[in-house]
Amino acid sequence: MRFALTVLLVAGAGALVPLVAPAYALTILIEALIFGLFAMSLDLMVGYGKLYSFGHAAAYGLGAYGCALLLTRLQLPLPAGIALAVLATLLIALPIAWICTRSTGVSFSMLTLAFAQLGYAMLFRFKEITGGSDGIDGIPRPAGPFGITWFQGKLGYFYLVWACLLGSYVLCRAIVRSPFGAVLAGIRENEAKTRALGYNTRGYKMATVVLAYGVGGLAGALYAPFAGFASPELFFWLVSGRVLIMVIVGGAGTLVGPILGGAVFLMLEHELSRVTDVWPLIFGSAFIFFVIFAPEGILGLIVRRRATAGQGTVDGAA
Amino acid sequence: MALLECRGLGKRFGALRAVDAVDLTVEPAEIRAVIGPNGAGKSTLFNLITATLTPTSGSVRFAGEDITGWPVHRVAQRGIARSFQLCHVFPALSVRENVRLAAQAREAGCWRPLGGARVLRRSAEAGDDALERLRLTGVAAARAGTLSHGDQRLLEVAMALAQRPKLLMLDEPTQGLSIEETDRAVDILNGMLEGGGPSLLLVEHDMEVVFELAHTITVLHRGRVIADGPTAAVRGDPEVQRAYLGDAA
Amino acid sequence: MTGFLGFILTQCLNALSQAAILFFIACGLTLIFGIMRIVNFAHGVIFMLGAYVGYTIIAVTGSFVLSLIVAPIVVGAVGMAFERTLLRRLYGRRDGGAYLMVTFGLAVVLSEAIRLVWGPQPLGSGIPDFLRGIVLVLGQPFPLYRVFLIGLGIAAALAVWQFLERTRAGLLIRAVSQNAEMVHALGTDVDLVRTGVFGLGCAMAALGGVLAAPLVTAFLGMGTTTVIDAFVIVIIGGMGSFLGSIVGSLLVAVVQVFGAYYFQDLALALMYALMLAILVARPGGLLGKEE
């Protein structure tokens, strides 16, 4: 009950933001929210499953290109384009998840990276469809079914993204607190033991990867019509790197931490990269610092402080 | 019909026969102990039965089904629960969450990502039940990793119980426990099995515990069975006595 | 020699010279793994750093030979500094993910640093004059530079082998690979050995970079493909196995060279297909058992 109220409050507050913020800030805000959503999707894998992916850009890129193609080639209404792009990402994620979860540890991470690299290479191989290094340009925001157009303007698009972010967050939170989430916690803590209890851990890991790809794909699908173009950089390993860094620094395993971390990071990046060229160097160094000295990330530290104060466990009430 | 039936079970690592042509049965409501010196192959035998290792020869039948070569989780689903020699719990989760996860495996819908409130509730109830029987309710909220060694072992047993198995396999459950904790454990195990509980197969070094609990004993030496029978008989077997029981007999 | 046989010979020589470069990288990675049980994700970027540093040395001094000597030393020092100040703090942590993250962070930081210092354009110094030209190998014309690579690769493999087998330092390294605690109990400063090996591994990768630069030019992004290649090699050859790094390098080079010829378009995909095939066949790898 309290959670529902909090969500409503936050939703309302967020809805008011663009009405008071200056117009140029709205663009950054929308990008920040999209990136926060992208970061949260990776948190499912990294924070809740300890499945370190170095290739999550693939999810983002798949969603973006999928949506771009659907909107430019088929002129589908925007919501349909986004929904179908997410579906396509989920489908493609199935074999990827199947192969990657065959391995653990570093091998798993290398496989995820390999798939992102493969995606990157495929873009250039099939340049008639994907536009090669130029990417896909001029992506429209076609009017929705029944002539709905409120999301075509920037303000409307903000609300679309905001709704998707909140909806995804509520969904993911429900999932991690479900029986499925409990099994995932077991896998994270001691996979062998979880298997010995009778759970088919491979299946759970696969499902987690696919879900993460789906939500990541949603972020990408929201990005493409917003930016108006999709280009191969979306698959580049540094994109995977940025989002992974954001999850760790924001606080892996909290969902909210990566959202906030991702959003704040993007806004900082926008401000600071105007001023200095060394911003990527800074955040890379910050990342190393966090991994060594504060691996729970910012939100993780806060949660831990509260938990030890209340003498509960990190995972909260059973 | 025997609950568990191992025939000619064997595991080779290269030239080493860790387990060699072992025949072993466990009947319903039976308590069987497996004893033998270190390196006799007791834990390996356990691993073969629970499918943590794949046998290189022989077969395992459980509740009428041939489970040889099955994956670990499938064997567990069929009704075999075990504890490990090196204690395996989920250290960062609370004691309550540990047993709840174990109990959850029995529920249809244990995998549900949504709409699983009932599953969670029932698992929690079954888990709390197991905690009570093991007298661990007092530490339910603590992180499992902070428990004393003895309590962690009991937690492992609680988790195995929460799985509501047909066969409970305990690998050195009293290892590292004080005399007091050992007595408590034996007490609990005896009580558990009286109420129509699972069959018990246990590896033990503590002979007093073995003689107090077990109906039957299997003696392993260098991977082979050298004696098998009712506790009194094995206890009285002069060869076994000489080699392994020392003065405890 | 003409015709088909000549073609095969050329391709084999290409594969050998390719294997030489791969060997430098893979050997470094496997040594580091053997000593520290971690996969240095930054290894590809270290290779890249070697290429760029080598380029600068040549630009400043005009001497290729000098770059072969100085670049590995410089990059090796960078590696050792990283290990001493940062990586070391993770020893004793049971969380395997932390090492991965830290070396990943290093990859990001180095990548960006390279971009800042040298700019985003690919840099090429070309093949040094004294190594230009064609020689005849069994009657088949072949670039001198590649012959030089093969020779250097063989020499290096022999040198490392002898170093590991015959010298005290090599013995120490092998001992620490097998049982670090024991070695520590015997009074050796294991930390020093680790730092040294990490530096050596980085130096070798850097040398590979210097050698590769004239062929491929230095460019951003060469790090990622390389680390995957190196990873495939050590998976094939066995993590921590020196001999395995030689075998793996040869195998991967053959696949890359012949694959590039017969399946041009899919050359890149072929590498990943190989990795996928290997990991599918042996999914635990030798790392899955590290829990």
Image (cartoon, coloured by chain):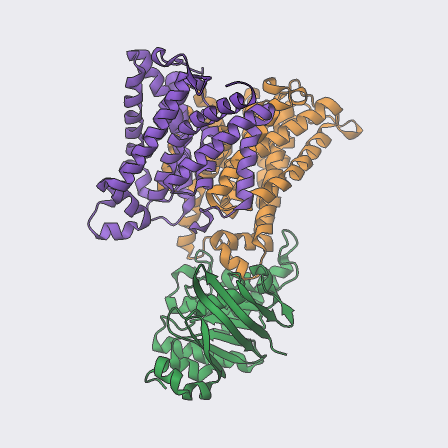
Chain colours: A orange, B green, C purple
Q: Is residue C285 left or right of residue B115?
A: left
What x and y, as percent, mark residue B31? 51, 80
Residue C94 or residue B16, whichever sits in front: B16
What x and y, as percent, mark residue A38? 56, 35
Residue B103 figure quarter: bottom right
Q: Is residue B222 left or right of residue B53?
A: left
Residue C267 figure quarter: top right
User: In this rendering, does residue A196 appear at all?
Assistant: yes
What x and y, as percent, mark residue A205? 57, 48
User: In this rendering, does residue A276 appear at all?
Assistant: no
What x and y, as percent, mark residue A195? 54, 58
Q: Is residue B127 above or below residue A286?
A: below
Q: Looking at the rendering, in which quadrant would you find the N terminus of chain B? A: bottom right
Q: Is residue B14 above or below residue B36?
A: above
Residue B227 or residue B76, whichever sits in front: B227
Residue at 48% x, 55% y: name it: A190
Residue at 40% x, 73% y: name it: B174
